[in-house]
Amino acid sequence: MKCKIFFFAFFSIFFTFGQKPINVIPKPFKVNAIDKKFSLNPKTIIVANNTNSFEVQFLKESIKQQTGLELTTKNAHRIGSRIHLILEPESQFPNKEAYQLNILGDRIAIYASTNQGLFYGIQTLLQLIPFTPNASEIKLDNLMMDDVPKFQWRGMHLDVSRHFFSKEFIKKYIDYLAMYKMNTLHWHLTDDQGWRIEIKKYPKLTEVGAWRNGSMIGHYTDQTFDDIRYGGFYSQEEIKEIVAYAKERHINVVPEIEMPGHALAALASYPEFSCTGGPFEVGKSWGVFDDVFCPKDETFTFLENILSEVMALFPSEYIHIGGDECPKVRWKSCPNCQKRIKDEKLKDEHELQSYFIQKIEKFVNNNGRKIIGWDEILEGGLAPNAAVMSWRGTEGGITAAKQKHFVVMSPGSHCYFDHYQGEPKNEPIAFGGYTNVEKVYSFNPIPKELSAEESKYILGAQANLWTEYINTPEHAEYMLFPRIAALSEVLWGTSNPNEYKVFETRLIQHFERYEKKGINYSKAIFEVTSKVQPAENGVAFELKSVNPSGIKYTTDGSEPNANSISYEKPILVTKNQIIKAAYFENNKVKSATIEQPFFITKSTGKKIELEHQPHENYGIGGSFTLVDGMKGNPSKFGRDWSGFWGKDLNATIDLGKSETISKININTLLSKVSWIYYPKEIQFLVSNDGINYQSIQTISQKEIEIKKGNVVIEFPKLKAKFIKIVAKNNGIIADGKPGAGSNSWLFVDEISVE
């Protein structure tokens, strides 16, 4: 007898069977558990009106892969063990992605109004079925489940320009998204370092632009290169195949064709569309290049022809046109650009960029599509129908939503999967930053600054996988898993940061599934993580792991073992020392060792106030990062450094009492490709009342450069209770340098007072 559907009408809802959790990710919206079992066995059949549909065949093949059971399919109802796929009227499931999954007695039924809803119900069912090869019977707990996502854009990005990935891996990547009910793949196909899509009207884009004569080795700061020709591209037939593969799995592929910046590969192929005429070489290094598309008529014809072929390949409603990191250096000295500014009565080069984007948008709109671009497309005025992808924090998304433009949130603070996810020294090389599973899980795509009405413009969010430092499928998987699971629950709308440990328990159960599928995943979740708090005469070093009682540590710099000190409470650190810690289970180490040197001075652990707080992307510990006794690694500037975007550091440290001091040390950072510059100057001041300050010394940018950012001043002994340090931000980045025209980043770390 068919079960009548009352969507979301259960009264007794919970997410565990007694003490046994339902290890489904993303967590379903509602679950009602029933104390009975279903038998999945060789006699179980799959019942559906269309037994040849993709969903039926997908379910059949997946069950065979997981259990060895080869089920038959029927198009008619039958008594006995069966899995029934049922399409209902839209009135029953107004949201096309919603589904209901019931496991009752000898019948599993998945209800939905679309094949997409059925597919998501199947994905949930497959997570409930254990990997048990050669099984004769599998018992599943009875339940009734109603499920529906909150956000309509649940995405992952993949950059194939910096490093190229095969057609086979792109399909595998799509499978990974489908496994966690993601519905959007943002495919970054063009950039300075490679053009990856065949355009038949312009064959040199792949003949020339798809290949570079070497690549960076190691981190950008190392400035080392090889001379190996590198590249690849996807033919239009391959792209059609991939798009069709994604469509079957209900994933929309959004192509990105970068403009007006990040265009060096295209300009190496067709230099006539630049401001200078070239010649150019496909980019070998990472970062931002000054040569961009020149906004002249023939350039727009070129780009419109490209986009015509792109739109013929991708049915996506949105076409991503980049719009980010476009230096204005060439435009400022280009006669064509200056004439365009004058003829169109534009104020400056920023409005010229807006003109460029709006002209492209009009063409895309006339072809029945919409554009989406990175949040820089806000500069100079947003195109009328454009959607914004907010990556430089959430500010761009907030601005766009308030202007009634649709937004996809993708801030670097939570959604950049090219960041480290564990202790950097134990991880493969990454861009920088620190974004672990817990941080991803804490993300809320709807900023508190938006009203309920404005929040409707938040389509959802996505995480980005930029591949400057990712050159193999195995490394890409490592950076994706398990963070994609945390993001999927955020976007499904059932995450709860206050219950992260509950999620973590479910997530760990998925690790066996990864191993069975041959997925290379990060085990950084087992790693010991740390947090530092102020303490009397020093700091308190708090350690965390999946089970804190399994942490062993040493304070003498030796490697921890099963007989080392068991962690019970935060470790008081009042002197210079090295603490090492690792996580153990059954006396066997389960994690890499973390190592933390401490440098204790008169400022360590003291109260510190900042006039400007660090940026959300680079301010994990807030102001306390500057006096926590830990010095940041210059090559890994995302974790222990405080970053200020376009703002000064103005810090006041309260030593608690008048102290005799004669030395102050502060570290600053330079990484021009990342738009990080030394401050213009650093002022050091002291006071005993917190009101009247005496200047001790001012260090110029040139002196900071000589000291390579590690600024130490020494002076005759004096008494002071308050120390004020003002580091002036470099300001707007000069022409000819990476990020020209944008705000500089100022990165600072440990302020030591002796």
Image (spheres, helix red, strand yellow):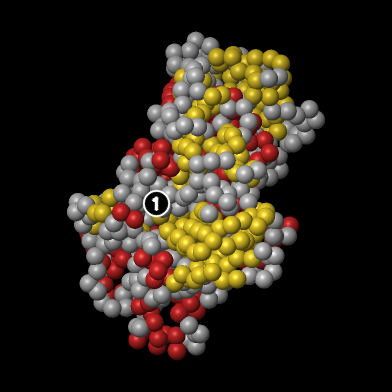
Q: Nearer the viewer, residue 193 or 257?
A: 193
Q: Residue 209, position in %: x, y? A: 26, 61
Give the quadrant of residue 612.
bottom right
Q: Residue 448, position in %: x, y? A: 70, 56
- Is residue 634 at all visible to an observer of this figure? yes
Q: Does residue 422 sit above or below 729 in this rendering? A: above
Q: Does residue 257 sit above or below 327 in this rendering? A: above
Point 47% across, 41% down: residue: 597
Point 67% across, 64% down: residue: 688
Q: Nearer the viewer, residue 600 or 301?
A: 600
Q: In this view, does 269 lie to the left or right of 221?
A: left
Disc 1 target residue: 635
- Dot 1 amino acid type: Ser
Q: In this view, does 384 lie to the left or right of 132?
A: right
Point 48% across, 83% down: residue: 348
Q: Is residue 46 left or right of residue 332?
A: right
Point 75% across, 29% down: residue: 13
For the N terminus, give its image quadrant: top right
Q: Does residue 444 sit above or below 687 in this rendering? A: above
